[in-house]
C-alpha cells in the first residue's frame, strides 16, 4: 500500500517522501480515505501508531481545496489534552503542509496555557486555518471575544480519553456547544472508557469506526517487568537498574511535582544526569527539559503524567513506573512511550506492599501477568501478600512486618489507609471516578 493510493495530493506526497515515510501505517491506511470522504471517524489508536498524520494529512488536503473564510474565521479545531501534544501536532502540520499551494499564508495557531494570552489574542485577530488547542485556554480566548468557533468545519479530538482523565469534561462540553451543527468530527482515543463512549455516541454522526490492534500491552516489542521494592528504596533501585543495565535514556513516571524534583536531584547527586518535568514549570523550562532529554544531554527525565502525555521521543528504550499510574488505561499510555516505530522497549514498574493490590488490578484489566522480580541487595523487607484470586475483585493488601508487630502489640497499623494523602500511594485500586461520572451536556446533532 502506498500513500498515493490513499488519494493524497502531490504536495503532501512530496512532504511524506522528504520525511522518508515509505508506506502508510494501518491507522493511516484506514483513516485517510474515510476522512477525505468527509464523514465522521471514530478511531481507536495509540500514540506511536502514526495517528497524527492519519488526521492531519486529509485535513490539510481538504482545507487546501476549500475556500478560506473572512474575519476571525476558524476552519478546523484540534483539541488535545496537553501543550506538548499541541506543539507536536503543529510541527507535523507545518512539515506535511509545506508544499501545498498557499502554504506561506496558511495559518496554524497553537492555543495552550502556560504562556501569555496576549500574543495569542493578537494572532487570532485575522482568523486561522487550524487551531490546535487545549480546552481551557481556548475558552479563555472565547471569553475574551478573541475567537469565534462558529465557522469550524472540522473538529478533531485527539487523545479523547486523556481529555477526560485530565478533567476537561466540562470544558469539552462547553467548546462543543460553541461549534456549528454542521461539521466533520474525528475522534481519536487510545482507550474507550464509558465517558468517551458517551461522547462518541452524542458527537458522531454515522462514523467510520476504525479499530486498531488494542494496546501496546499486546505488542511483543515491549518487555514488561515488575520489581518488588520497599517504597523508600525506589530511588536506590532506579539508580542500580540504570547502572546495571546501562540504560542511556529513561523516562520515569512519578505521582507528584515534588517527587519529580526530589528523584531528579537524588539521581544528579549520584552522578546521573536527570531533569524534572511537571506542569508547574514554565513553558520555557518544560521545552528545555524535553529538548535536553531528546538531545541526550540528560539521561533520565522524571515526569508526571500530565507533563509527559503525548511526548513523542524517537527511540525511548525504557520507561519506569516509579509511582504506579492511577488507572489501567494510564498504564497502557505510559508504557506506550517506548517500543515505538518497531523498536523494542522495556517498561518497568516498582511495586511495594502498599501498591501491590493496585498493580494487580492494572494487570487484570489489561489481561497481563507480569513476573515479580527483586534486585539482590534490595529485597523488600515489607511483606507483599497476594490477594485471594477467587473473589473477582482485587481487594487484599499485604500487612507490613511492622504492622504485624503493631497488631500483635494491640496498636493500630502505620500503613496509611487507601485514599490518604501519601505521595507514594496511588489512589485506591479502582479506576478513576471521572471516567464514570461525566454525562455530556451536548447540544443535539443536526445535519
Ligand atoms: P504518532 O502516533 O502520530 O505520534 O506518530 C508516531 C511517530 O511515527 C512519529 O514520530 C511520526 O513522525 C512517525 N510516523 C508517522 N507515520 C509514519 C509513516 N507512515 N512512516 C514512518 N513513520 C511515521
Image: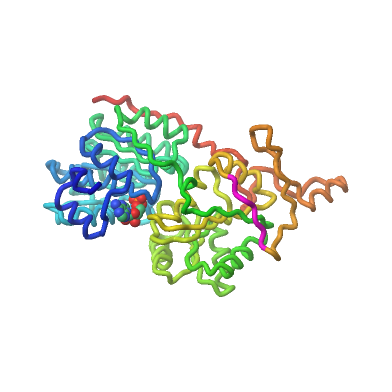
Q: Residue furthest right?
A: 409
Quarter of the image where one finds residue 162: top left
Q: Is residue 330 above or below residue 185?
A: below
Provide residue 385's location: percent of width, then percent of height: 73, 46
Quarter of the picture holding the C terminus: top left
The one of 174 and 221 positioned closer to us in this rendering: 221
Left or right, 151 with respect to 82, comes to left
Specify whether 28 is left or right of 126.
right
Residue 59 spot, x, y in % from top left = 23, 44
Q: Quadrant of residue 159?
A: top left
Q: Which one is in front, 239 or 417?
A: 239
Residue name at image x 76 percent, y 50 percent: 400
Asked if residue 117 can be seen in this view, the reply is no
Q: Residue at x 15, y 48 (%)?
A: 9
Residue appearing at x 55%, y 40% in the figure: 367
118 to the left or right of 429: left
Q: Position of residue 17 (x, y in %)?
A: 21, 57
Residue 161 percent across, percent down from the top left? 43, 40
Q: Quadrant of residue 103?
A: bottom left
Residue 91 in view of the camera:
yes
What residue is shown at x 32% (from left), y 43% (from top)?
A: 27
Tell me the magenta residue range.
Answer: 369-375
Q: Is 42 placed above or below 333 here?
A: above
Farthest front residue? Answer: 1
Find the residue positioned furthest to the bottom.
Answer: 271
**Residue 94: within the magenta?**
no
**Type of secondary structure dominating the magenta stretch:** loop
Q: For this rendering, which residue is in front, 168 or 55?
A: 55
Residue 370 among those drawn in magenta: yes
Amino acid at each position: 500500500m502506498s500513500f498515493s493510493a490513499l488519494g493524497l495530493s502531490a504536495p503532501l506526497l512530496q512532504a511524506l517522501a522528504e520525511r522518508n515515510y515509505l508506506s502508510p501505517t494501518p491507522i493511516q491506511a484506514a483513516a485517510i480515505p474515510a476522512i477525505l470522504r468527509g464523514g465522521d471517524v471514530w478511531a481507536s489508536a495509540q500514540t506511536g501508531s502514526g495517528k497524527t498524520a492519519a488526521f492531519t494529512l486529509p485535513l490539510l488536503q481538504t482545507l487546501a481545496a476549500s475556500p478560506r473564510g473572512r474575519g476571525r474565521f476558524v476552519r478546523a479545531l484540534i483539541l488535545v489534552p496537553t501543550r506538548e501534544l499541541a506543539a507536536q501536532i503543529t510541527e507535523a502540520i507545518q512539515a506535511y503542509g509545506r508544499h501545498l499551494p498557499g502554504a506561506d499564508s496558511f495559518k496554524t495557531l497553537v492555543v495552550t496555557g502556560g504562556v501569555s494570552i496576549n500574543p495569542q489574542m493578537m494572532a487570532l485577530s485575522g482568523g486561522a486555518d487550524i487551531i490546535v488547542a487545549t480546552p481551557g485556554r481556548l475558552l479563555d480566548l472565547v471569553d475574551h471575544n478573541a475567537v469565534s468557533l462558529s465557522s469550524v468545519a472540522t473538529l478533531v479530538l485527539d487523545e479523547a480519553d486523556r481529555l477526560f482523565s485530565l478533567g476537561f469534561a466540562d470544558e469539552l462540553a462547553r467548546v462543543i456547544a460553541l461549534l456549528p451543527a454542521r461539521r466533520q468530527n474525528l475522534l481519536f482515543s487510545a482507550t474507550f472508557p464509558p465517558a468517551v463512549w458517551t461522547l462518541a455516541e452524542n458527537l458522531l454522526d454515522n462514523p467510520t469506526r476504525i479499530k486498531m490492534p488494542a494496546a501496546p500491552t499486546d505488542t511483543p516489542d515491549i518487555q514488561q517487568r515488575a520489581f518488588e521494592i520497599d517504597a523508600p528504596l525506589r530511588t536506590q533501585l532506579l539508580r542500580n537498574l540504570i547502572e546495571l543495565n546501562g540504560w542511556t535514556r529513561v523516562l520515569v513516571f512519578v505521582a507528584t511535582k515534588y517527587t519529580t524534583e526530589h528523584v531528579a536531584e537524588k539521581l544528579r547527586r549520584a552522578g546521573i544526569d536527570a531533569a524534572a518535568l511537571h506542569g508547574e514549570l514554565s513553558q520555557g523550562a518544560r521545552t528545555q527539559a524535553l529538548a535536553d532529554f531528546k538531545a541526550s544531554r540528560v539521561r533520565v527525565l522524571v515526569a508526571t503524567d500530565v507533563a509527559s502525555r503525548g511526548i513523542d521521543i524517537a527511540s525511548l528504550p525504557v520507561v519506569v513506573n516509579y509511582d504506579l499510574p492511577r488507572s489501567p488505561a494510564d498504564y497502557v499510555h505510559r508504557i506506550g512511550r517506548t517500543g515505538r516505530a518497531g523498536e523494542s522497549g522495556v517498561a518497568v514498574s516498582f511495586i511495594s506492599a502498599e501498591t501491590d493490590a493496585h498493580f494487580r488490578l492494572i494487570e487484570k484489566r489489561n489481561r497481563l501477568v507480569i513476573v515479580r522480580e527483586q534486585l539482590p541487595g534490595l529485597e523488600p523487607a515489607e511483606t507483599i501478600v497476594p490477594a485471594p484470586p477467587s473473589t473477582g475483585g482485587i481487594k487484599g493488601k499485604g500487612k507490613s512486618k511492622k504492622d504485624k508487630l503493631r497488631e500483635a502489640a494491640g496498636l493500630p497499623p502505620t500503613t496509611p489507609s487507601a485514599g490518604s494523602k501519601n505521595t507514594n500511594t496511588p489512589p485506591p485500586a479502582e479506576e478513576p471516578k471521572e471516567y464514570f461520572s461525566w454525562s455530556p451536556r451536548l447540544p443535539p446533532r443536526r445535519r
